Amino acid sequence: QVRFVESGGGLVQPGESLTLSCTTSGIITSVFNSNAMAWYRQVPDKQRELVASITKNGPPNYADSVKGRFTVSRDNAKKKAYLRMNNLKPEDTAVYYCIHFNYPTTWGQGTQVTVSS
């Protein structure tokens, strides 16, 4: 069974940083490497928003709202993904999820990020 477990969220002040981690299970390495990992975020009453994505070898892609502040990465050997978030803003407050594009309907429980002074 394919699973994604997000961690690393928390309560921070504006301007601070967090690094989110995504641990996958149930995916063999060749499948993990065959497609992109992505981070989404969601706030209540709004659709999930694609924040960043990264393929095995290609350049990462970012939403305009996070370009220059967030960095997505992946460890193909460990089958994990990460999202480094710098200079956090209150509008970054959301539940963050990771997915693998081969399993677009499989979602974890997410990790809450709250940016507030």
Image: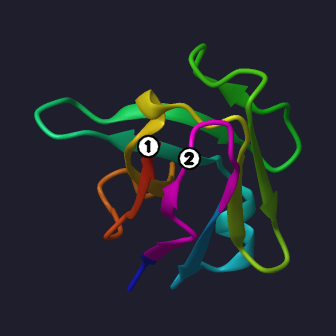
Residue 10 on the magenta segment:
yes
Residue occupying image coordinates x 10% and y 33%:
45
Query: Where's the N terminus, which quadrant?
Result: bottom left
Is residue 6 within the magenta segment?
A: yes
Where residue 27 sits: x, y (%)? 57, 78
Say which residue appears at 22% left-offset and 30% top-offset: 47
- Residue 30: x, y in percent? 74, 70
Label 1: which secondary element: loop
Name the one closer to the observer, 47 or 102.
47
Q: Residue 102 location, x and y as percent? A: 49, 54
Point 75% across, 60% down: residue? 33
Task: Choose top left, top right, bottom left or bottom right for residue 23.
Answer: bottom right
Give the SS element for disc 2: loop
Q: Position of residue 73 (x, y in %)?
A: 79, 52
Please indicate whether residue 44 sits to the left or right of residue 116 in the image. left
Q: Residue 13 — which label? A: 2
Outermost residue to the top: 64
Write the start and end of the magenta stretch as one range: 4-19
Q: Which amino acid does label 1 sit on?
A: Ser
Residue most extreme to the left? 45
Q: Which residue is drawn at 40% across and 41% down?
A: 93
Left or right of 84 on screen, residue 75: right
> Observer-nearest residue: 35 or 41?
41
Quote the CA–CA distance across marks 2 and 1. Answer: 5 Å
Type of amino acid under label 2: Gln
Image mark count:
2
Q: Quadrant of residue 112?
A: bottom left
* Circle 1 crowding by C-alpha within 10 Å: few under 14, some 14–19, many from 20: some
